[in-house]
Amino acid sequence: MNYKTDKVSWRKSKKEIRAIREQVFVYEYQFPLESEFDHHDIQCQHVLIRDDEGRAIATGRLCEDGKISRVAVLMKHRIPKVRRQVFKELLNLARAKGFQKVYFDSLLDEVDKYKEQGFVAAGKVYMDGGIAKQPLMCSVDLFKIAQNVLH
C-alpha cells in the first residue's frame, strides 16, 4: 500500500485530526477527551497520512518549540512504515522551520527504539494519564528515522 502525506493546518483538517486522535488516545488509551485537545493545536503544524483510498489514517503535530507530539496511527494501519512516514514529515517541517533539535515524549516501553533513531533522554520519566513517558530529544542532523524502520 502506498501512503500519501498532507501537511495541514488545524483549521483546515480539524475533523480528520480529531477523529484519529479520539480513536487512538481517548478510546484506546483511555485519555480524558478534555486533555487530548489543547490550545497548541491551532498553532502547530500537522501532518495527515492517507491510505490508497484517501482516508486519513495517521497524524502528528510539530509545535512552535520543536516538540513532536500527538502522533497517532489507527490500529489497523499501525505498521512501522506509517509511523516512520509521520515522523519523517514532521522532521522535514522542523528542518524547514530551522530547528536544530526536536523533542518527543515517548511511551516508556518504546524509548529504546527511539534511542536507536538518535534520541537521548531529555528529562525524567513522568506519568501522563496513568501511562509512563520519557521526554526525549534529538538533533535534526542525527535523526535516523528516514533511513531506518521503527520496530
Image: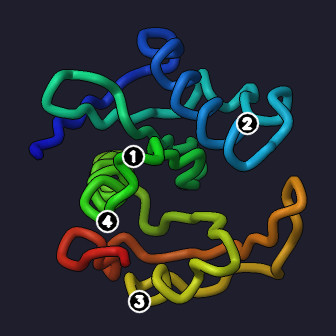
Name the one closer to the observer, 109 or 66: 109
Mark 1 and mark 2 lie on one chain; the one further toward the N terminus is: 2
**Residue at 82% from the left image edge and 79% from the top image edge:** 125
| Residue 37 image position (x, y, % from top left) | 72, 28
Mark 3 and mark 1 lie on one chain; the one further toward the N terminus is: 1
**Residue behind mark 2:** 26
- For the residue labelled by badge 2, is the local secondary structure a helix, a strand or a loop? helix
Q: Which amino acid does label 2 sit on?
A: Val
- For the residue labelled by badge 4, is the local secondary structure a helix, a strand or a loop? helix
**Residue behind mark 4:** 80
Q: Which amino acid does label 1 sit on?
A: Lys
Q: Is residue 53 visible?
A: yes
Q: What residue type is labelled 4?
A: Pro
Query: Callout 2: few (<14), some (14-19), or many (20+) C-alpha neighbours within 10 Å?
Result: some
Q: Measured along the vertical axis of the image, is residue 18 above or below residue 114? A: above
Which numbered mark, 3 or 1, is in the foreground of this view?
1
Q: Measured along the vertical axis of the image, is residue 81 above or below residue 108? A: above
Q: Which residue lies furthest to the front in this view?
A: 76
Question: Marks 2 and 3: CB-CB under 8 Å?
Answer: no
Checking the image for residue 116, the label placed there is: 3
CA–CA distance in space, label 2 to label 3:
29 Å
Q: Measured along the vertical axis of the image, is residue 39 above or below residue 138? A: above
Q: Measured along the vertical axis of the image, is residue 47 above or below residue 138? A: above
CA–CA distance in space, label 3 to label 1:
25 Å
Question: Marks 1 and 4: CB-CB under 8 Å?
Answer: no
